[in-house]
Image (cartoon, helix red, strand yellow):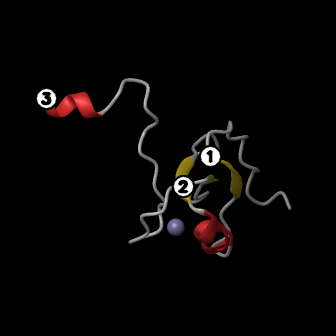
C-alpha cells in the first residue's frame, strides 16, 4: 500500500467552494473576468456551493464584472463583453 493507492484514477478533481473557509463541495462554476486587467478571451473560474453561489455572483457583478454561473461540470459559455448591456 502506498499513499497513492487511495486516489483512484479517474476520480473527480476535489472541487470545493471558492468562498474562504467554506469546505462544501461545489455544485456551480462561476466564470468571470475583470475587464480592466483581463483580455476579452480570459475567463477566471471559481467554484461555488449552493449556499455561496449567489454571494459570489453578487460580489463580482457588483464590481461591474461580467459573470456567468453554470452547473459544475458544464461547459462555460463565452462571457458577455463589458459595456454591452
Ligand atoms: Zn460555499
Mark 3 or 1 closer to N-term?
3
Q: Is mark 3 within 8 Å of ligand 1?
A: no
Camera-near label (2 vs 3) is: 3
Task: Judge by depth and name the residue closer to the eye, 79 or 85.
Answer: 79
Q: Residue furthest right?
A: 85
Q: Residue furthest front?
A: 1
Q: Is residue 25 above or below residue 7?
A: below
Task: Tell me which residue sits at (37%, 23%) in the image.
Answer: 9
Q: Is residue 49 above or below residue 74?
A: below
List x then y, in percent, for residue 43.
58, 46
- How many other residues sit within 10 Å of disc 2, few (<14), some (14-19) or many (≥20)? many
List x then y, in percent, for residue 60.
62, 68
Q: Is mark 2 within 8 Å of ligand 1?
A: yes
Q: Secondary structure at mark 2?
A: loop
Residue for badge 1: 72
Q: Is residue 41 left or right of residue 17?
A: right
Task: Judge by depth and name the residue closer to the eye, 83 or 44.
Answer: 44
Residue for badge 3: 2
Considering the image in quadrants, where does the N terminus appear? top left
Place residue 26 in its image quadrant: bottom right
Q: Calculate the distance from the C-alpha at mark 2 to the C-alpha at mark 1.
A: 7 Å
Residue for badge 2: 26
Mark 2 or 1 closer to N-term?
2
Q: Secondary structure at mark 1?
A: loop
List x then y, in percent, for residue 39.
58, 45
Camera-near label (3 vs 1) is: 3
Q: Is mark 1 within 8 Å of ligand 1?
A: no
Q: Is residue 80 left or right of residue 9?
A: right
Mark 2 or 3 closer to N-term?
3
Q: Calculate the distance from the C-alpha at mark 3 to the C-alpha at mark 1.
A: 31 Å
- How many other residues sit within 10 Å of disc 1, few (<14), some (14-19) or many (≥20)? some
Amino acid at each position: 500500500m502506498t499513499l497513492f493507492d487511495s486516489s483512484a484514477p479517474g476520480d473527480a478533481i476535489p472541487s470545493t467552494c471558492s468562498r474562504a473557509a467554506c469546505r462544501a463541495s461545489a455544485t456551480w462554476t462561476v466564470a468571470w473576468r475583470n475587464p480592466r486587467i483581463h483580455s476579452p478571451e480570459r475567463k477566471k473560474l471559481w467554484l461555488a456551493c449552493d449556499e455561496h453561489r449567489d454571494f459570489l455572483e453578487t460580489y463580482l457583478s457588483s464590481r461591474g464584472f461580467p459573470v456567468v454561473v453554470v452547473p459544475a461540470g458544464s461547459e462555460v459559455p463565452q462571457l458577455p463583453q463589458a459595456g454591452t448591456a
